[in-house]
Amino acid sequence: MSDKNGEECWYALKVFYNRVFELEKQLSQEGVRSYIPLLHEDTVAGDKKIRKRKPAVSSLMFIRQSEHYLLELQDRMKASCPFMAYFDRETKKPAVIPDREMELFMQITSADTSDLEYFSDEAIDYRSGDKVRVTGGPFKGAEGYIKRIRGNRRLVVALEGIIAVATTYIPGRFLEKMPEN
């Protein structure tokens, strides 16, 4: 997970003034992989149905790049599209998101469902529940922790210190308990 040799890692960004799509376009032009958890809103304009992209979490996006590039980009974009990387409280460096955690987060947030709920990572003690793998349904293959939220059993996938996302109710027959590491 270290970036000492310029290796690419996932980082979370808080993009100011909700300019995530502007930054996404800039990164795309530079060939940088990025990810924005999205909601899709369908609207009708005349006789055409239009699907509009909207950030699921205001101002949040992720990029996969080296720490050096991230810090250089942050400095370069200061005036046109300012953002701030989430930092690790202990190391005081940009917080690296492990690839596996990011893959699971993207799997859950990319599902074509509007029933996801987002929380600050501190809002959910996701470690209190059992670690599970989903064996069926739209979230098949996802891993996370089970937490009761508003009376329903939900799968919670968290990026520690950044954000957590909870799925809709998942039937017990689609859950397989995993051993704790």
Image (spheres, helix red, strand yellow):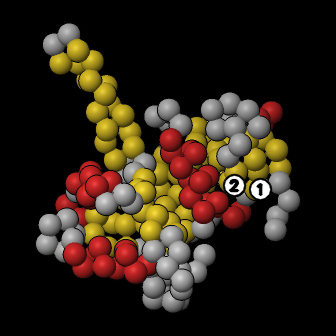
Q: Residue at x 42, y 62 (%)?
A: 63
User: Percent position (x, y) of residue 135?
Assistant: 77, 37
Q: Which mark is residue 145?
A: 2
User: Around disc 2, counting alpha carbons within 10 Å, would you say few (fewer than 14), some (14 to 19), or many (20 or more)?
Assistant: many
Q: Which mark is residue 130?
A: 1
Q: CA distance from mark 2 to mark 1?
A: 5 Å
**Amino acid type of the residue that numbered disc 2 sits on in the rendered structure:** Tyr
5 lies above or below 164: below
Q: Is residue 161 visible?
A: no
User: Of marks 2 and 1, which one's residue comes earlier in the chain?
Assistant: 1
User: Percent position (x, y) of residue 154?
Assistant: 64, 44
129 lies above or below 111: below
114 lies above or below 155: above
The picture quadrant where one finds residue 85 is bottom left
Q: Are marks 2 and 1 in contact (CB under 8 Å)?
A: yes
Q: Quadrant of the C terminus?
A: bottom right
User: Percent position (x, y) of residue 147?
Assistant: 66, 52
**Amino acid type of the residue that numbered disc 1 sits on in the rendered structure:** Asp
